[in-house]
Amino acid sequence: MNDKKLETFSYDDSVVKKFAIATVLWGAVGMLVGVILAAQLADWRFNFGLEWLTFGRLRPLHTNAIIFAFVGNSIFAGIYHSTQRLLKARMFSDMLSNIHFWGWQLIIVLAALTLPLGYTQGKEYAELIWPIDILITLIWVVFAVNFFGTLKKRREKHIYVSIWFYIASIITVALLHIVNSISLPVSLMKSYPIYAGVQDALVQWWYGHNAVAFFLTTPVLGLMYYYVPKAINRPVYSYRLSIVHFWSLIFIYIWAGPHHLLYTALPEWAQTIGMVFSIMLWAPSWGGMINGLLTLRGAWNRVREESILKFFVTALTFYGMSTFEGPLLSIKSVSSLGHYTDWIVGHVHAGGIGWNYMFAAGMLYYMVPKLWKTKVYSEQIAKAQYWTATLGLLLYYVSMVVAGITQGLMWRAVDAKGQLVYPSFIETVDKIVPMYWIRLIGGLLVLTSMLMMIYNLYKSIKNAPKNVEEEEFQAEALDHNKYKNEKGHRKLEGLTATFTVLATIAVLVGTIIEFVPAFLSKDFIEVSEKVKPYSPLEVAGRDIYIREGCYNCHSQMIRPMVSEYLRYGKASEAAESVYDHPFQWGSKRTGPDLARVGGKYPDSWHYFHMKDPRKVIQGSIMPEYTWLFGEKTEYQVLTKKLKVLKSMGVPYSEEEIYNASELAKEQAKEITLNMADAGVPMKMQNKQIIALIAYLQRLGVDMKEEK
Amino acid sequence: MSDHNSENNKEQVQVFDDEKKILLDHDYDGIRELDHPLPKWWLFTFYLTIIFSVPYYLAHTFGGADSIQKEFKEEVLAAQNSQKEYDDEKGKFNLEEYQKVIAGPKFEKIAKKTYKRKCKACHGKDGGGGVGPNLADNFWLHGDGSLETVYNTINKGVVDKGMAAWGAKLGKEKVYAVLKYVADFKGTTPSNPKEPQGKEYK
């Protein structure tokens, strides 16, 4: 050993520090936005009458901030910190690290500006508009080059399980983001996704589900494999389990997206795939929890004393709970009760707060003292933070599960007369508003705990010595020849390119098997002669619907269930959304389904309802959309919009495209005239509310009649 | 940890005696790995989910097991039959039942509350109309304004025009109560009456 030549190197911890600070700052912002939204559901007036703060526009900001800003920065901090140490190599390029950091923060700032202004793609967790999507792609490539470059110059032959998870995550997130975001621009701020209806739904939930899988889960499992054994100084429980659960997890995860679309117009064979793969996902998910928790053997007494371990153990426990609840909710009959309700909201927060936030807190308390060569300022504050967060999480989760199951049962209750027991949707909302208040308290506690951590870490860093020099380390250069006789998985761990290719294949198999039929089979693009493209004014109205984020509270998908048939009408069919770029099926019903709202009420009903929902529905918790009565419909851009839609296969005639603006004006005039009786003045005809009414009145009418 | 100066080599990884045999020679920044076999219960769970999933998938996709659509059709049929049965027997206007309800002690309270919650938004607080037609004049759009026809309109609604089928939502007692409330508008002068619609019946 002594005759080997040692190389001297250091780690770039400055980028880790930056990501760590960004984590807590964006975490607090994301949670604050969440608390505002929780307050709005308890009492709608918490939007303060400002369009930028209404639920539909703000909720995407909350989800994007938590997923990509809070958890995103935390995984980057952890990956940059652990990867260098696990590979005994400094990051490939300090400059790329910095471009990654600042580029990512720029993306977050752009998101925080555009989303409240209503610039959105209208697809959940992928709301950001196309120029930002391109920026995300570029920054992700920078990250990937930096990461794989580091792999190349590593001094450790074998890559540890953490690195396996990082590789799978980096590859898959790139794939998900690019495939789901492809769209054709109308202008700098507006584009239409190339997919429509059922195809868009399938691609979107392949993305949406795997954003949870490959952004919120697999990278964090990788971090878990580094920080948990580090924090307890115990060997990882089972190497074999790492191998089996890693490969089974990434292979199975990618298939499970359609469980978000059970009982929709997605062909049933694809729904069943989503369900069974979710069930088979249970054990592979638990593999990570087991390997984490069993590593604690002999150290459980320390959980009582050390906050770091409290955070880690709680994170793993909630990970285990959520990954059991996930498969449970994917069973068709359970989904029929839980889908569109607050149960799902509870489920994701058990993951988001219980797993991601708890883990990030443990990781930061481990990492910050090491990075800044200091001590945690107050173990007492860390403990108080832990208990505050835990109490908040429990209040949050329990209130949402109770609200969700209560409402789910009320929606489906049918009596012996063959009638809905709770025919007015608002009754089912009234019932759960108290739960919204409890959730608000839970959310406030979680936010408070976050602020406690910020204070605690700030004080720790402030007490740190200044101008600490970068530490230097020594290790042998990597000699690949030394490892020629290895076999099986151990050999693979030394072949990073092969490993990456295999991981890519693992996630491509499910993707291809689900997508190929979706793009070839007629089931997915079932065209009915009855279904006509939206009129130009309806297109304008639809874009307002998307801008205001109506899909955050209203679905457009009547499920084939008798209670839905009685409440909303005939079950939705695939053909009905064939021209929907993007689809707007939604995933939550804070308000009723709108798939067949067209013609259900007079135009004037919508007019007065949008102005002041409580005048029409007593107890409604919907915001007032007063600005739609002041802002004018943009007619000029309609020709361009129709052109783009036509290029994607929506059958508009040249005449319609050319005259789009005139046709829209005519229809607007007609609608306004219709409402004259109810006291709507003609001067309203060019306002956005009229375009929105045109769209709403069109929903579901083409195929309303029984076959 | 040999040649790599790990930052935390002060503390050695703790390994119990019974683990020494399965401690692998892997060492990543001081992290060691044991080679415990896969927990049996875990493996069993994994197999069980696969054993369930494969036949379930085959049966539902190729084997003719009940599909969502088939169950749906049966449920709808059952509900429609119950509705029909109920409509034939109890759905019609019955003067005796009506008089019994409006003579009841809670009638006024129920009528007022129901009207306020369900009808006021479209027909105005004193029946003068708004989104919906005026209920105080002698002009009627659906039927002749008799108790029976107004009952039918409330009960079954005029769904195309935005009037919901309140019978199913409110139940018979409330429908009778609100029917009386509406009938009492006749001859009053609302504060902001809508122009007459439909045919006049004296």
Image (cartoon, rainbow, N blue to C red):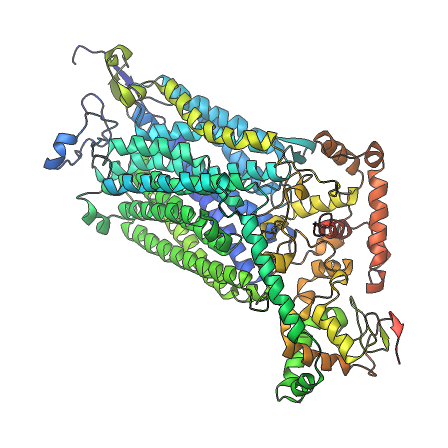
Kindly identify the residue that appears in the image at 81 percent across and 82 percent down.
Answer: B186
- In this view, the residue in front, A327 or A321, is A327
Report how many numbered discs are placed on residues in the image.
0
> Is A601 left or right of A432, judged from the image as shown?
right
Q: In the displayed image of the protein, which residue is found farthest to the front? A: B64
Q: In the rendered view, tell whether residue A679 sits above or below residue A533.
A: below
Residue B183's spot in the image, x, y percent? 77, 81
Q: In the rendered view, tell whether residue B174 sits above or below residue B29.
A: below
Residue A65 appears anywhere in the view: no
> Is A510 left or right of B112, judged from the image as shown?
left
Q: Quadrant of residue A661?
A: top right
Q: In the displayed image of the protein, which residue is found farthest to the left? A: B17
Kindly identify the residue that appears in the image at 70 percent across and 46 percent down.
Answer: A544
> Is A553 left or right of B98, judged from the image as shown?
left
Residue A65's spot in the image, x, y percent? 50, 43
Kindly identify the residue that appears in the image at 53 percent across and 59 percent down.
Answer: A39
Residue A67's spot in the image, x, y percent? 47, 41
Residue A658's spot in the image, x, y percent? 84, 34
Residue A696 appears anywhere in the view: yes
Q: Quadrant of the N terminus of chain A?
A: top left
Q: Quadrant of residue A299?
A: top left
Q: In the rendered view, tell whether residue A393 sits above or below residue A659.
A: below
- In this view, the residue in front, A205 or A172, is A205
